Image: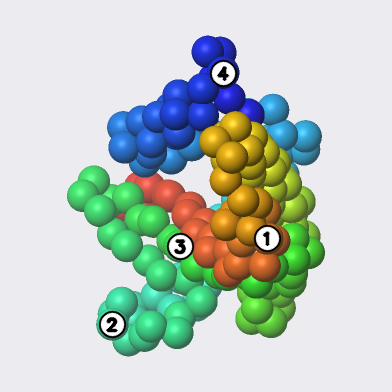
Amino acid sequence: ATTTDGSLAGLFGKLLTAFEEEGMLVVEGLDGYEESRLHALAELGSCTEAFHQEHRGAAEEEEGDDALFRASRFAGGVTRSSLATSSKGSTGAAFEAAVEARCPHFAQFAATLRRATSEAAAALAKSLQSALESDRGSRGEEETAAVDLLAAVETGEHLEHFHVYRHDNAG
């Protein structure tokens, strides 16, 4: 829960640097993550391709804010299809009915992906919570002033964005 020098400040400094320089924190070694990621994104690619084939010719504005998949077109003929979802609390929360109906195989593989991500977030929250409590205890602060990071992860809303990029060979 701390850096090699054992300092809480060092740990938070490393986290802050990761977010400032990279915009993310990379967690490696999650069981089943890589295989699930590959399968989920391959299935999502199939779903988005079918969706966009059905809606070919429709202007992006016509798809509206409630469109299941949002398409963004970039220079060089690259299209990014995005699926934005959220879940509250539980790691086993189902996708919206429209996602489950249109992309059941994606939803199946993505469930493993979501579970691994939630477990990593919970492990990070536990580690940070432990470090905070240890630091607070060493300074003689009351435990009632604590922020419960694990509860925030377990009960908070989880926002998820899945992106699939494809190159339009005709473009």
Cα–Cα gap, marks 1 and 3: 29 Å
Q: Which structural element holds mark 3?
A: strand
Q: Earlier in the sequence, mark 1 or mark 3?
A: 3
Q: Are marks 2 and 3 in contact (CB under 8 Å)?
A: no
Quarter assignment of residue 13: top left
Write down the residue under mark 1.
Answer: 151
Q: Nearer the viewer, mark 2 or mark 4?
A: 4
What residue appears at the point 74 percent right and 71 percent down from the top-left corner? 94
Q: Earlier in the sequence, mark 2 or mark 3?
A: 2
Q: Nearer the viewer, mark 3 or mark 4?
A: 4
Q: Nearer the viewer, mark 2 or mark 1?
A: 1
Above or below, 49 against 15 in this view is below
Above or below, 21 against 142 in this view is above
Write down the residue under mark 4.
Answer: 6
Q: Nearer the viewer, mark 1 or mark 4?
A: 4
What residue appears at the point 56 percent right and 13 percent down from the top-left corner? 4
Cα–Cα gap, marks 2 and 4: 53 Å
Q: Badge 2 local density, few (<14 within 10 Å), some, or many (20+)?
A: few
Q: Are marks 1 and 4 in contact (CB under 8 Å)?
A: no
Q: Which structural element holds mark 2?
A: helix
Q: Earlier in the sequence, mark 2 or mark 4?
A: 4
Write down the residue under mark 2.
Answer: 61
Cα–Cα gap, marks 2 and 1: 39 Å
Q: Residue 133: percent from the left, percent from the top?
A: 63, 41
Q: Which structural element holds mark 4?
A: loop
Above or below, 78 against 56 in this view is above
What residue appears at the point 68 percent right and 60 percent down from the top-left corner? 151
Write down the residue under mark 3.
Answer: 82
Q: Residue 44: percent from the left, percent from the top?
A: 60, 58
Cα–Cα gap, marks 3 and 4: 41 Å
Q: Earlier in the sequence, mark 1 or mark 4?
A: 4
Q: Earlier in the sequence, mark 3 or mark 4?
A: 4
